[in-house]
Every structure is written in structure tokens, then in C-alpha cells.
Amino acid sequence: MPMKADVLICGAGIAGISTAYHLSVRRGVTDIILVDERPPLTLTSDKSTECYRNWWPDPDGSMVAFMNRSIDLMEELARESGNIFRMNRRGYLFATASKHKAETFREAAEEAERLGAGPLRVHDGIDSTYRYSAEEAEEFDAPISGADLLLGREVIEAHFPYISKRAVAAIHPRRAGWLSAQQMGMYMLEQARGHGVRFVSGRVESVETNGGRISGVSVSKRGETLRISTPNFVNAAGPFVEHVGRLLDVSLPVFTELHMKVILNDYLGIVPRDAPLLIWSDPQYLPWSEDEKSFFADSEETRWLLDEFPGGVHTRPEGGPGSNMILILWDYRNRVMDPVPDPPLDPLYAEIAIRGLSALLPGMRAYFEKMPKPILDGGYYVKTEENRPLIGPMPVEGSYVVGALSGYGIMGANAAGDLIARYVCGENLPSYARSFSLERYRDPGYREILRKLEEESWEL
């Protein structure tokens, strides 16, 4: 006898779990099945920096509104759970040695303020109105928002003396920080299970339709085929979202990039335990010795190590009290590739990341000769051309997609799950819904938004 469900969700990553949570716990839809051939939260959801922010490149305000909604929902979860997932509000600190980039910081902050990310505060020289206390920032719902622009060595060194003396400006978005994605996801999953959500370990092999709408799903489970009757199917398959879309003859406009991160034992304490997320915004050439440069130049396979690398290397403390671990991430060489379960990892990544980070934190040079043993990790960013998500109905009635949450799956998952739940339950949609739907690409006006995203990026 076939199983039945009101909603079947393909994918038990953070997006699928959030969808199940917002349907069951928040809206009372109890007959929900989550299907995944892997344990929950293990393919991509545990591969991120676990950070969040409402600071986004955004010509029409959609991403800022989306992230504000998601952060609101995460704060609600933190309050009701006693902050079991350790959400903080330490913020992101972008630093630069370029006076031109400093002006970019100001323009980005002014635009962010206009879009609803909070007010800009400018601090030129020592200014007692700027405050940063990690102890206060551990409070996830601290009232401060917006961004603080720090201009000049004096104010930067007064608060962040470990940052390179080359830095002439820094911008500190404040409604930002990090959390334990695994614990947040498991909390939502446990709550959803308590409201009737079931998990089936298996692979979605086919999706059935009847009269132009969803009627059922076939799942392979330990060599057997299980048919589940359902009128609603949610494609939350993460890196495999495009593959699952093809089961309904739907072509989703996405591609996948391999991204990596490294965790190190910072036994010298170069990154203070009370630091915000630290980001060096400037392009750079890596600090190799003359002998190393000569060696790399001799081979076409290594010559790229002498090229200019992009800005964006970032780090943060990892772990609780007593931990010396830090997390470093730098997307210096993105690789577009089809997803595979065990992605190839770059053996040079840790050393490149440490050398790049030394531009921001000169103390990292102490690790050039004796690097701590790295823990490498890798996962996929699923992206649309403009790096906005796909959330909403697919062309077959009763089918939905929640995906392409490239690099912001943890921070955006709650708003994404809430939005899909609104579609399934026929509720009023927020203003940003159209900007993330598949239908947006048929809107001539949306091409203007795409043009602005290309020309007016807030690349910091």
C-alpha cells in the first residue's frame, strides 16, 4: 500500500528542513515527508562559515528585505530555544589599504541604509561613539544595526590593533555574526518531527503527474521502490536541484561551484577570540620568497600562484571557550563543476589561505614555516547568473523549488522555508517573492535589475 503525504520535500539540507519546519510548526501542516539518501545536514549545509548578515548588493532591496526577514526568524528561534545554536552579533569587519576602497565602503553603507539594512555611522579618528565589545555582541538580539565606517589608522588601531597597519579604513556591518548551523538545523528538525514530519532515507527517482499536476513520487530505498502519493513536491536538493528539476522536465537556470574552507589550530593566538568576522577586501600578490617565486615561475602548473589574487580572504574564531581553532575561507579560484558526493580538495588551499590572510593579519606570517595541520572541507555553491535564489513554484502545478542559496544557505534558509510555506498554503507573499521566482526571467523589467547588479556591485 503506497504511503501518502500532503507535502514531500526532496532534500534534508538546511533549506529542506527549514521548509518542513515552517510548514509543520508554524502552519500546522503535519503530514510531511522529508526524503534524502544522506543523513540530514551532511552534504552542503555543514560546509559553510555559518555566518549571517543583512548587508547585500541589491538594487531593488529584495535581498536586504529577505535577509532581514530571515534574521528575524532566526532570532525568534534563538529566543525560544535558549539560543541553543549560539547565535551572536559580532558583525563583519571589512578592511582596506585603499583610499578609493574606503569611498566604496561609504557608498555601500549609504545604499544599505537606504534599502533598510540600518544607519551608517562614520568615525574619523578617535571617536568615543564607536563601540565593539564581543561580550555584548554575544547577545544575538543586541539593538545595534547598520554599519560603522572607521576612517584612519587611529580609530582602527584603537579597537583592532592586530589588523595590518596598512589598513586606512574599515566598515563594520552590525546586524551580522555567526551561529552553529548544525545545531540550528537539528533544532528545527526535532521541532518538525514533533509536529508529525517524517524522514525517509532514500533517493527520489521519479516524480509523477496526473492531469498536469503532482500526484506522487517514487523513492528507491535499500534496493526497493517506495511510492509516495502527494499533491505537493518541493525540490530542495541543494547541489542536485537542477538534476531533480529534470525529473519534471524543468530546466533550472543554475550552475554549481566548488568552494573550500580550512580550520586551523591558531596556537599562537593571532586571531583574538573576541574578534568579529575579519575580511581583507583588497586584491593582493601572495608573499612568496624569491626562491619560491623562481620555482613557481618554472612550471606552467604553478605559475598561477604568482598572479594577482582577489580580495575577500576572511577568518573568524571557531569553537567555544578554550578553543584555539579558526576558520579561514577564500574563494580565490572558483571551479564550476558538476556536483559529486566527495569533491576534490586543493592540497595548496591551506597555505594559500594563510599567506593571503597575512595581508590582513601580519601575525599569520609566523605560520609560514611551521603551519598547523589543516582540516580541509569543501562543498558546493549553487548559483543563478545574478546570485539570487530560486524560491517558488515550478511549471508543474503542485511543484516548488527552493535552491540556489549560493553562499548564504544558512542565513537565508529561514526566510526561504517561510516563503515556500506561504506558496504551499496560499498565503499572501512578501514584496521580495517575485524577485526570486522562476518567472522573474520573463519580466522585461527584471533585465534592468540584472544590469544594475552587474554594474553596481557592492564588492568590498
Image (cartoon, helix red, strand yellow):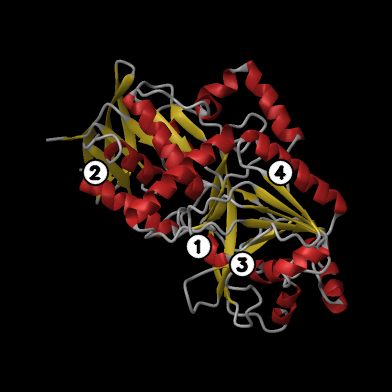
What residue does disc 2 label?
197
* 233 w.r.t. 127: above or below: above
Residue type of the residue flagged with mark 4:
Ala
Q: Of the two numbered discs 2 and 1 on the same chain, state the one appearing first in sequence.
A: 1
Which residue lies at the image location 34% right of the left edge and 27% below the top edge? 424
Image quadrant where residue 386 sits:
top right
What residue does disc 4 label?
109
Estimate the x, y position of residue 385 in percent, counting from the top left.
Answer: 63, 35
Residue type of the residue flagged with mark 1:
Glu
Foreground label between 2 and 1: 1
Mark 2 to mark 1 CA distance (whole Å): 32 Å
Nearest the eye: 352 or 300:
352
What count of labels does the image hold? 4
Estimate the x, y position of residue 140 in percent, counting from the top left.
Answer: 48, 55
* 344 w.r.t. 28: above or below: below
* 446 w.r.t. 401: above or below: above
Mark 4 to mark 3 CA distance (whole Å): 21 Å
Mark 3 to mark 1 CA distance (whole Å): 11 Å
Quarter of the image that includes the N terminus: top left
Residue 285 makes an appearance in the image: no
What residue does disc 1 label?
138
Dot 1 crowding, Cα within 10 Å, few <14, some 14–19, many 20+:
some
Dot 4 crowding, Cα within 10 Å, few <14, some 14–19, many 20+:
many
Q: Of the two numbered discs 2 and 4 on the same chain, state the one appearing first in sequence.
A: 4
Residue type of the residue flagged with mark 3:
Ala
Q: Of the two numbered discs 3 and 1 on the same chain, state the one appearing first in sequence.
A: 1
Q: Of the two numbered discs 3 and 2 on the same chain, state the one appearing first in sequence.
A: 2
Task: Name the residue furthest front.
Answer: 128
Foreground label between 3 and 2: 3
Residue 154 makes an appearance in the image: yes
What residue does disc 3 label?
275
Foreground label between 2 and 4: 4
